[in-house]
Amino acid sequence: MREEANIQALSQLQPDLMGFIFYPASKRFVGLDFNQQMLKKIHHQIIKTGVFVNAHQNEVLEFSKLYGFKAVQLHGEESPEFCAEVKKEGFLILKAFGVNEDFNFEQLKPYEPFVDYFLFDTKVDAYGGSGKTFDWRILENYNLNKPFFLSGGLSLENLEEVKRIKNPQFYGVDLNSKFEIEPGLKNIEKLKAAFKLINN
């Protein structure tokens, strides 16, 4: 998200987290001149989150502090040690992984002490925003003690199915490409419908 009116409209819906993408290769990149003043009007209970992909640690920390983020989502190949160093600075850590039918959740164990949430997205060649789902039945194999978010191709058409996922660590959903007018511009009416559906 990068347009002030759109950011404020979403703030009125009070999602738990709101993400801002600091990955230049993304169509949703906030840009080099993103105005931090836009974020000061966001509802105080919303966790403002910086999203980074294979960025240098100093870059993650510098931008996260500059923009007042409370959480950092790491969406690349960041190591457990990288997560630990960022977490030491007081941020909530969300670590994203691309999931397919061969995904082995055991590989997440080294991260477990250093993240607050995992985020499971659809495994594709690029990072994030594919608009594709993966076979959610694989989530039955997840048995670690960290809660997780589900991402990847979520839409108004499949949220009822999402609500049937029974893993006790399933915490929330990341609503992205299917709830946009264009990359980086959220469709507020679709999100209103999604929030109503989820809360019911």
Image (spheres, rainbow, N blue to C red):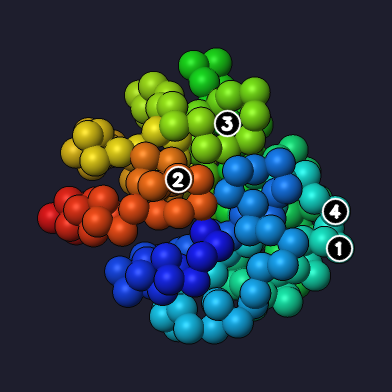
Alpha carbon distance from label 2 to label 4: 28 Å
- Residue farthest along the top direction in this orientation: 102
Return the residue nearer the eye: 42 or 28.
28
- Asked if residue 60 lies left or right of residue 118, the reply is right
**As shown in the figure, which amino acid type bears the numbered disc 3?**
Gly
Residue at screen point 52% across, 37% down: 129
Q: Disc 1 or 2, which lies upstream in sequence?
A: 1
Q: Disc 3 or 1, which lies upstream in sequence?
A: 1
- Asked if residue 32 lies left or right of residue 14, the reply is right
Q: Which mark is residue 182?
A: 2
User: Do the residues under discs 4 and 1 have CB atoms within 8 angstroms?
Assistant: yes
Alpha carbon distance from label 3 to label 1: 25 Å
User: Do the residues under discs 2 and 3 have CB atoms within 8 angstroms?
Assistant: no
- Specify few, some or many for label 3: CA neighbours under 10 Å numbering under 14, 14-19, or 20 or more: many
Return the residue nearer the eye: 104 or 36.
36
Q: Which mark is residue 58?
A: 1
Q: Secondary structure at mark 1?
A: helix
- Specify few, some or many for label 2: CA neighbours under 10 Å numbering under 14, 14-19, or 20 or more: few
Alpha carbon distance from label 4 to label 3: 21 Å
Residue 48 vertical placement versus 28 (above, below): below
- Asked if residue 10 lies left or right of residue 47, the reply is left
User: Do the residues under discs 3 and 1 have CB atoms within 8 angstroms?
Assistant: no
**As shown in the figure, which amino acid type bears the numbered disc 2?**
Glu
**As shown in the figure, which amino acid type bears the numbered disc 1?**
Asn
- Specify few, some or many for label 1: CA neighbours under 10 Å numbering under 14, 14-19, or 20 or more: few
Residue 26, position as x, y percentages in the image: 64, 43
Label 4 sits on residue: 56
